[in-house]
Image (cartoon, grey):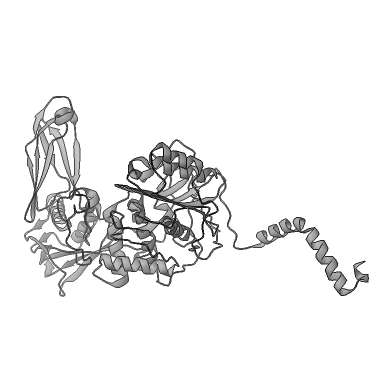
Amino acid sequence: MIASLSRRQNLNYLSIHFMKYWHFIAPLAFLFISSCSSNSIPEAEPNTRSLPLSKSPIPAKNSIKSQATHQENRPTDKTKSIDTNHSQIYVSQSTKSTFAKANTSSQTGKITRLPTQVLSALRAQGISTAGISVYIQAVNNPNPLLTFQENRSRNPASVMKAVTSYAALGILGADYRWPIEVYTTGSISANTLRGDLIIKGYGYPDFKPKDLQQILSAIRSKGIRNIEGNLVFDNSYFSVLRQNAGAFDGQAYKPYNAVPDALLFNERVSCFVIQPKGKQISVSCPTPSRNVKIINNIQANNRPCRGSNASPRMQIIPQGRSVTVKFTGSYSRRCGQRKYFKVVSDPANMLFASIWRTWVGKMGGSIKGGFAQRKVPSHAQLLYTYHSKPLRDVLPTINKKSNNVMARQLLLSIAAKQYGASGTTAKGKQAVRAWLNSRGLNFPELQIDNGSGLSRTAKISARHMGQLLVDAYQSPYRNDFIRSLAIMGVDGTLKRRMKNTALRGRGQFKTGSLKDVRGIAGYVRARNGQTYVVSILHNDPKARSRGRATHDEVIKWVYSH
């Protein structure tokens, strides 16, 4: 019949019948196209446990090159997955992102109001909706699912560490290792260094006594037993303005207020151990410092371990460049051992005392010189270089435990790598913003401050935090970034959160809290297998003390969506 019609009649006939049967044809066409696409994103299989994180095949998009220094020491083993025996965010070996860049438009979500259960949680805690911002987006969808006050600039508290960490992966590289260099002046003969031993730091955030032991063993292997000169410490790779460590909240000696340093050692933290010893109470410090003196005036007794008999008073008395730590009061022998962690000294003095204790006390060497702090002289000779563990293995400590000083070290390392020594906070902020811009992440309201979130001026919107997380998921840095986040109900700051719910092990987040501030941002694998980005920033006088239940309701809603 069609053959007997004119050409125009043929076209009309086909058009009419095509439209008539379009509702049958369209689904088949969609399925055919989807099955042929090489860029489709497979969703996670629901109820799959201990799913590995694998290398993303997506090429880097940034114009700033991501390369590690000291590349000859890069590890060649494949990235290992977290062994938690719990479900994690699913990343397929063959997954390719449909969206080359995160959608940074200002499009509102499909849903623009808070779910009923979230509103009920707010009302139950007596909190208004004015201070909460929420942004939710599936990682394989260019548009958000839910938005609520998402464009308002908020203080993110420690959620800001996610921004610093992502930029560090892009600028430093996941395999980046911090060097610690050892120099000498003078000659070495008959097991004796007739000159100074100089240690220069480059900002390793996790420099601990076990690393120092390896360095000292390497020095001994170079034929040195006796040091006739000084121990000299060079921390010039960073330039940190002199500041009052307690300016934030008046707690200058709290570990979370520790100030960064290119030779940061043991996070600046000194541990004071109180314990019964015979009829007396002893006070010792396994992490000594050259300039710290301990006065122990604690009176021992056998009374019940409570009240004033369980909490001796600790007084920290700065005296010029020295510090006296005085313990007074009473302590029951029934209390056993107690530990106090305080920041009372600086890394150079801490290193001097630790080197002396190990080199002289344990390794049988000698040091005839004293303490000095200055730059490596031009005539010094490089003796040995120690390389830290890679960035990918440092990030979990920063994000899971929300370590402030280590995050600040990261920002200064970024600064020095990108713009040269000395690393400064200003350079670090500039480098992070430039790298984000190179990824298409233009955040006008972003205020990074020191990079840790321990700040009253740090700002970002829930939308932009969410878009950063989507971009991270679609980037080559996805696996190392996600692995660094706390796992819901399993570890880090989320170890006890929702641990007895179906969400245990199904979310990985960065949390944050300050006075009047609470936030959480990361990824949750929903019941249907879809992975969503969740960004919640909450600034309210009741947010820190009462906001957690509301945030949990948001995450539960996403999981069940």
Name the side, left or right, on which 255 lies relative to 51: left
Q: Against 470, is 415 above or below?
A: below
Residue drawn 39% across the image and 38% down it: 125
Name the side, left or right, on which 403 lies relative to 287: right
Q: Quadrant of residue 350?
A: bottom left
Q: Against 302, is 312 above or below?
A: below
The foreground one among 471 and 495 is 471
Q: Position of residue 151 (x, y in %)?
A: 43, 58
Q: Position of residue 437 (x, y in %)?
A: 41, 68
Q: Is residue 498 visible?
A: no
Q: Against 470, is 508 above or below?
A: above
Q: Is residue 487 visible?
A: yes
Residue drawn 12% across the image and 70% down it: 187
Q: Which quadrant does the N terminus fall into?
A: bottom right
The foreground one among 42 and 112 is 112
Q: Position of residue 341 (x, y in %)?
A: 20, 44
Residue drawn 13% across the image and 69% down it: 185
Residue drawn 56% across the image and 47% down it: 529
The foreground one among 334 and 119 is 119
Query: Outermost residue, top direction?
Result: 303
Name the side, left or right, on which 113 lies relative to 212: right
